[in-house]
Image (cartoon, rainbow, N blue to C red):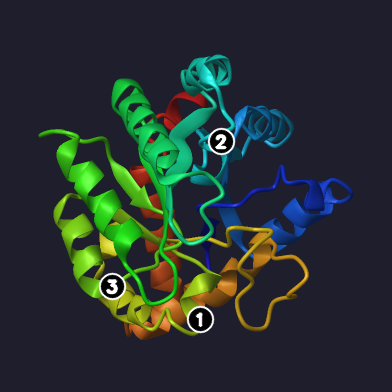
Amino acid sequence: MRLVDSHCHLQADRFDADVDQVIGAARLAGVERILVPGWDPDSCRGALELVDRFPWLDAAVGVHPHDAERVDNAAWTEVVALATDDRVVATGETGLDYDRLFSPVPAQLANLRRNLRLAAETGKPAILHCRSAAGRRDAQDALLAEVRAFGATPPPILIHSFSGPVDYAEAMLELGASMSFSGLSFRAGEESTAEVARRTPADRILVETDSPYLSPPGAPRRRNEPEWVRITAAWIADLRGGDRDAFGDQLIANYDTILAGKRAARR
């Protein structure tokens, strides 16, 4: 089965000792595309360094909601400069996290807005993180409101590691968003994700690991790795009632359409 990992933090320090082997294992597992998103200036530079070493990888640059309050104007200026690089195919990850609130909500909203503007200015999709506390949906509702408020032509949206109610997903899909699914889908409280995976149009669905986080069942808990995206991909293919190999071909096509508009120029 052909595979993609549309969100994998290979520049995280948990991979410092063996990133070459991790990437090699992903290749052997059938992973043909990996996107390495940044979350602050240092990790954005780290993503680009990996793309230099492994040209089949892609990078995204942006500021995560956890870091919204810590990235000042000078640091943001650096992220903006990196976003124009040909190795960068998307903006992010950014978004809202009302679960852990490592940055206060006003800072998260301001950060989301500047990342969305950057995505629109560069023409590169915005990768959006969204988490609410258990049993709540306030982050999802706020994120939807921000995308709607952006204007008549918001940038292309990729919802990373989908979490939330079905009606939120439907509203995002109506706005043209694509959906990526991770090992989070298997956790208690995320039962609506299966229905969202069934309803997402075939040409707007992706899978990811969010490595080194969110290990799916059967993968090592200590550290998720891109090879384990095969578990989530097989689960979604079966949910949708299709042939796994055909679903793998669709994943490759979707990655190249959703994320790789800028990618072809350097291939």
Q: Amino acid at mark 3?
A: Pro
Q: Is residue 177 visible?
A: no
On screen, residue 171 above or below 62:
below
Neighbor class of circle 1 (other Cα within 10 Å; few <14, some 14-19, many 20+) is some
Instruction: Name the amino acid, label 1.
Output: Phe
Task: Give the labeled residue for mark 1.
Answer: 186
Q: Looking at the rendered structure, which numbered label has been put on residue 59? A: 2
Dividing the picture into quadrants, the one containing residue 137 is bottom left
Residue lying furthest left = 152
Callout 2: SS:
strand
Q: Classify 10 Å Cα crowding around label 2: few (below 14), some (14-19), many (20 and above).
A: many
> 159 or 232: which is nearer to us?
159
Q: Which residue is mark 3?
A: 165
Q: Amino acid at mark 2?
A: Ala
Q: Residue 15 at what x, y percent from top left? A: 80, 50
Q: Position of residue 29 (x, y in %)?
A: 67, 66
